[in-house]
Amino acid sequence: MPSVLFAFDTADEAAWDVVNDGVMGGRSQGFVSVEGGALRFTGTLVTQGGGFTSVRAPRVIDLSGQSGLELRVRGSGRQFEVELNDGVRTFGRNISRRAPFPSSLEWTVVRIPFTALRSTIFGQSVNAPPIDLARIQGVGLYMVDAQDGPFRLEVDYIRSY
């Protein structure tokens, strides 16, 4: 049965936290708000010294039996990434399970199959067990497309299919 992870119909839909590359000496800046029925992730990417900014929210959900995520998005035409966190760690670090998706100036529905998720730590591929869909703990959105400059992403909903 498909599940709605986020509908963004209330301002306190979830506690979305910004994590910028300042944690590793970078200067990228990201900002997040929930308004008008959509999540808005905006900012400026600076590739020198880091090159990422992200927003993340906790969401404990069992996605067993589902095939992927569906997002209705509109943005600045840049590529973003979606992340699912299943809490798996290796070498004392969380394994990031991410896949890219495009944005355009018009509202578009994008589908990301779970098989497209790559397992990485700090952007480097790692061998890891398959994602545990029964133990999802959070969702994230990343701007990490290696292009300096401003970006904008609006998300109407995130759900499984």
Image: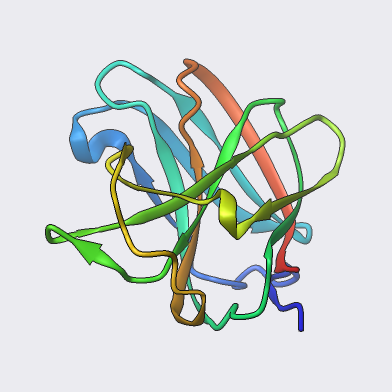
Q: Quadrant of the N terminus?
A: bottom right
Q: Position of residue 83 (x, y in %)?
A: 49, 54
Foreground residue among 67 and 105: 67
Q: Position of residue 150 (x, y in %)?
A: 56, 22
Residue plotted at (36% across, 19% down): 47
Foreground residue among 62 and 145: 62
Q: Is residue 83 above or below residue 14?
A: above
Give the image quarter of residue 66.
bottom right
Q: Quadrant of the C terminus?
A: bottom right
Q: Position of residue 95 (x, y in %)?
A: 31, 57
Residue plotted at (49% across, 42% down): 142
Q: Is residue 2 left or right of residue 133?
A: right
Q: Is residue 34 above or below residue 41?
A: below
Give the image quarter of residue 151.
top right
Q: Is residue 43 above or below residue 121?
A: above
Residue plotted at (75% across, 70% down): 9
